[in-house]
Image (cartoon, rainbow, N blue to C red):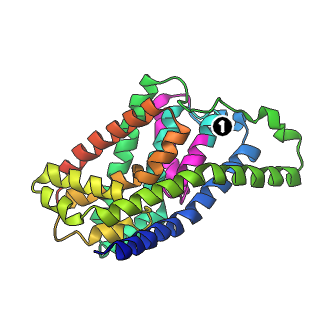
Amino acid sequence: MSSQSSFLQLNSIFISILIEAIPFILIGVILSGIIQMFVSEEMIAKIIPKNRFLAVLSGALAGILFPACECGIIPITRRLLLKGVPLHAGVAFMLTAPIINPIVLFSTYIAFGNKWSVVFYRGGLALAVSLIIGVILSYQYKDNQLLAPAETGHHHHTDRQTLLQKLGGTLRHAIEEFFSVGKYLIIGAFIAAAMQTYVKTSTLLSIGQNDVSSSLVMMGLSFVLSLCSEVDAFIASSFSSTFSLGSLIAFLVFGAMVDVKNLLMMLAAFKKRFVFLLITYITVIVLAGSLLVKG
């Protein structure tokens, strides 16, 4: 491949990643702004169960209601944590929302030729990963592990503001959040595009000769490709004749939880040690779960 054609390929992949991700980033930052201006700490305290197991379960299942991509979910999660949602519930929500929402599950169903088994395996493994990690984190951390000092809604006095003022505040917060996470999306999209252009897929495919290595290869591929969770099933289905169902599920779950662009966003929001520990947990549990999938 000539340098000019490879540059054009990099450019087209980079732009397509941005076009895919930006609508979901916008949804994420608008929801983040709404949470900031309209949801009080008292409301959060009433909704989230005190019991750690129920808090993790409610966080994981709340993902059904949010049609957000893995990069769009980080601003929402950060805002929820700043509002007082415990870390274990927030992370459970962050991990499941890009996978178990109806849009993603429906696209998975269509991509794999109307196979419900793939939908159940993907949704089931995502829920299992988030619940296990959520429970572990509930014992491991007492604070929210965010980099920024904990903001609260108190200094906005949202209760005393008119609806128009709150809507203005929502827009202002959304714009600030968009430019805050947008730069990491651009950097991540460029890295992902460069890796897709210059790292040969055939090199990765040649490594996956058994269940463990094929799952690891597909997890690595999902990280490199950095696809939005709404479209990743169509790419995964193209590997159906090459890889086992377990490794395809690993691709679909791991990539929606960790990829190049959302790794940079997580590093911008959370403490580095926490991010790498979280990724380690996700990697180990997704790999173990994928080995249990038979089909």
The span picked out in magenta is 50-78
Task: Give the labeled residue for mark 1.
Answer: 44
Q: In the picture provided, is 180 more to the left or to the right than 19?
A: right
On-image quarter of the C terminus: bottom left
Q: Residue furthest left?
A: 209
**Looking at the image, can residue 111 be seen?**
yes
Where's residue 189, x and y in %?
46, 59
User: Viewer-proximal residue, 10 or 212?
Assistant: 10
Where's residue 260, x and y in %?
41, 52
Circle 1: residue type: Ile
Residue at 41% over, 70% down: 107
Q: Residue furthest front?
A: 3
Where's residue 154, x and y in %?
78, 32
Picture quadrant where residue 120 is located? bottom left
Residue at 63% over, 42% down: 79
Residue 236, magenta (yes or no): no
Residue at 53% over, 30% down: 145
Q: Is residue 279 above or below residue 26?
A: above
User: Viewer-proximal residue, 64 or 150?
Assistant: 150
Residue 74, magenta (yes or no): yes
Where's residue 130, x and y in %?
40, 42
Main secondary structure found in the magenta portion: helix
